Image (cartoon, rainbow, N blue to C red):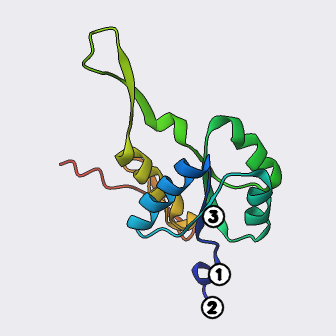
Amino acid sequence: MSLEAIRPNKILVFLPKAAANMIATKLAERGHESIAVSTVPEVFEALRSDNCSLAVTTRPEIDLLRSMRPIPVVNLEVFFHAAPSGDGPLTMSKRFDGSAFMKRIEFLAQPTGRRVVPGLVAYDQGRVAVADLGEG
């Protein structure tokens, strides 16, 4: 049996109920299995099951999650960016960068031995190589 077969693969989404369900739906559209929770007891139960490989939440909850179990956490807040809203030059709204969010999820969902950071060093099963930058 390979390590990938027994590796946890669900994404824990710890947000208010409506937001957790919306993110879980978007993850499912991209083929990711997730668990949407909105209370601390639900988080505790989900992390205790050891089925989650990473979590999505907001800044105030990161320490709580990591105190329960060391797990990679995606801070959803960093994907919201200020943008002019059209109601005048001083009015700003926040826009969600869904593309960058999904890229981060895709990266963290990969088995750790196969993660490649474009333009940096690739690490695959104990071998290190410079990633192809497509120059030349």
Residue ID at (62%, 58%): 54
Instruction: Count the marks.
Output: 3
Residue placed under numbered mark 2 in the picture: 1
Residue ID at (64%, 72%): 8
Residue placed under numbered mark 1 in the picture: 6
What amino acid is found at the position of numbered circle 2 in the picture?
A: Met
> What is the C-alpha distance between the residues marked 3 and 2?
19 Å
Question: For numbered disc 2, what is the local secondary structure?
Answer: loop
Residue placed under numbered mark 3 in the picture: 53
Mark 3, other Cα within 10 Å: few <14 / some 14–19 / many ≥20: many
Q: Quadrant of residue 80?
A: top left
Q: Earlier in the sequence, mark 1 or mark 3?
A: 1
Residue ID at (53%, 42%): 76
Question: For numbered disc 1, what is the local secondary structure?
Answer: helix
Asked if residue 128 shows in the view, the reply is no
What amino acid is found at the position of numbered circle 1 in the picture?
A: Ile
Of 84 and 132, the residue lying toward us: 84
Location of residue 4 in the rendering, given as x and y in whole percent from the top left corner:
58, 79
Q: Earlier in the sequence, mark 3 or mark 2?
A: 2
In the displayed image of the protein, which residue is found farthest to the front? 18
The mark closer to the camera, 2 or 1, is 1
Residue 66, relative to residue 91: is it above or below? below
Location of residue 7 in the rendering, given as x and y in whole percent from the top left corner:
63, 75
Does the CB distance between marks 2 and 1 fall below 8 Å?
A: yes
The mark closer to the camera, 3 or 2, is 3
Question: For numbered disc 3, what is the local secondary structure?
Answer: strand
Residue ID at (82%, 48%): 67
Mark 2, other Cα within 10 Å: few <14 / some 14–19 / many ≥20: few
Q: Quadrant of residue 44?
A: bottom right
Asked if residue 20 shows in the view, the reply is yes
Of 7 and 24, the residue lying toward us: 24
